[in-house]
Image (cartoon, helix red, strand yellow):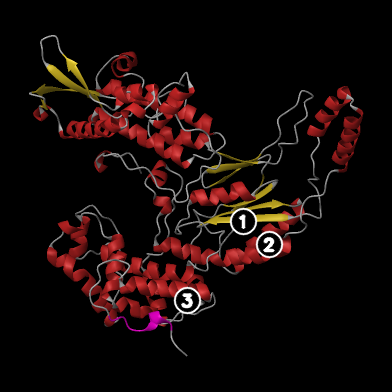
Amino acid sequence: MTSPCWLHPLCYNNFTSQADNPGMTALQCIANDNKSNPNLVNHKLYNLFFEEDFIRLAHENVKPANWRQLPFSMRTTLVGDIVKDFWEEQFQFQPRGIKSGLEEGIESLGLSVPLHRDRVVLEAMRLVLEAIYEPIFLNVSHGSRPSRSCHSALRSIRKGVQDHEWALVSDIRKEYKIDHHVLVKLLGQKIGDKRFLRLVWKALKVGHGERTDQGWTFKSIWWGTRGQNTLSLLWTNVFFHALDLWVQEKKAVFDQGKSRALNPQWLSFVTRLRYLERRGDASQLKQLRKQIAQVPKRLWNDSGFRRVFYVRYVDDILLTFTASKEDVLRFQEDVKDFLSENLKLDVSGGKLRLSHLRKNPVLFLDTKICLLSGPKCSSGKRNQSLSGLTRLHAPMEKIIKELAHLGMVSEGGVRPYPVTFLSRYSHNQIVNYYNWIMRGCCNYYSFVDNFDSLTKYLRIAIRSSCVRTLTMKLKRQRSARTYKDFGAELAARYRVPLKDGHVVSEKLSEEELTILRNRVSVAKKLKVKWEDLKREERGLLQRFCVPRLIHEPNGDTNLEFRGDYLLFCSKKGRTEEAVKALRSLELLPPVYNPWDFKRSFVPPPRPHLSAESSTWN
């Protein structure tokens, strides 16, 4: 029997790209073999750690940007020392709190535990496990996987949850702890290499496999900590992959019927409607159409139709049902029994919460999921033609609470406050900070059905807090004067003198010089297509982006340019062309789109503020 190509020793010399790296080639072979044979048991995985190219590949993924600031001897011996320890089978993860000279040098660069040497080995383990399990993970799993994110999970909910009245949500993230024996047993079903499993045990014993809680905070969304592909998150996916397979088998038995049965009352009304249409009785047709709108087309309590929908993001689980309450309760008990018996998880005390979507919306991935009840008619009854549609809403109460935690608004979100720690920064940095908050929230909730309400509140709250912060920084008594000087967009104004047609750069700070260079670069690009732009767009660009010459009465010439402006700060334009121009410059929020999901959510860049002054926890 011929062994797979990745089992043979790797003998390569020099490689110029990551695609030519033998470590990457071996990982691709592992992924292809497991994709073609999902029941394959993988052997000799430990031999990959003997190859410097493979360890160097893992090191490239986790090394910091300022890695070259360390001494040359530290940088050159790291990969070789790791490979030597694996050859001699003496590699041990260091307990946290014990630092070698290399780790002390890395921590001087601002890095934290786990130690960098351990991080390289953990990343190498993650690459191997990802190559094994990524081809066999089901489509219902969305957390910490390539090209999958919170948005891909929520998109599947938008598509799959229609007319589902019951929802079962897991609330075990904060309290559960993965049983290490169960995890190693599950890994042993796909891995036959005992040395690799011993390496897994070493990592688990020192605590590298524990996942810290990544609940909803502005930090987790905008810094991207919820989407990091770490080994602990991959282990969590492996752990709950058994639940995915069990639900898939259970769903095949649970689902019944092709569609709900038609409502007999609705059928009688439709038959009567067709009869009246043939007769041409307009008065009775109008009344009958109102009655049809108040009657559901299909039976909600059809015992012959059942459906279950399942989605998981790492350890956040959501199950929705179209079934009777008795069937849902039985399914809930089966899930509890599987989690407690097979995965050794304690799910008592309401950790699997059952909710009726029409009455009590559920929170999944920090998004409210509810079922739409049709709008009320003049008779007081609801229009059933729109009933049963799934709605995804941004949790306004939670967003207001986070803004209050940042000091921007009061506890109820009614009164705006200045952010005091921002007063030590420049005008442009303050505006960038508020833009970071606005852009991150609007990007994450770009698909919600209450997007207009969300942007309306954020525009008012963030602009009011920003103007108060600038008023406090400039030591002015009223915010009206700040608005008068900088406008509703609150963009800073800079003036620099010109001498012989050149800017006197000595008058500018480093930040102001960077802003001026960006504005001049934008002006050069616009010069090529200036004639093709609309009149409204030209006016906005001249106002915000293009520097202009100011001739003083004494004969001096200054160059005036503006800093970054506050996002979504303008009022609605008078014409369609004006609205398009405002939206192109992000002066107005984008048009609501219920399918504006990002395939791979990327948080906006962090503003340039020092870590010492940050208020994040």
**Residue on which the image places disc 1:** 310
Q: Is residue 8 magenta?
A: yes
Region in magenta: 4-11
Q: Main secondary structure of the magenta part?
A: loop
Between the residue at mark 2 and the residue at mark 3, the CA separation in whole angstroms equals: 28 Å
Mark 1 neighbour class, 10 Å CA radius: few under 14, some 14 to 19, many 20 or more: many
Question: Which amino acid is tagged 2?
Answer: Lys
Tag 1 secondary structure: strand
Q: Position of residue 275 (x, y in %)?
A: 91, 34
Residue shown at the point (81%, 36%) measured from the top left = 295
Question: Which amino acid is tagged 1?
Answer: Tyr
Q: Does residue 368 appear left or right of residue 525 in this picture? A: right
Residue shown at the point (38%, 21%) measured from the top left = 535
Q: Which is in the foreground here, disc 2 or disc 3?
A: 3
Which image quadrant is residue 473 in?
top left
Front residue of this view, candidates 55 and 585 = 585
**112 relative to 488, above or below:** below
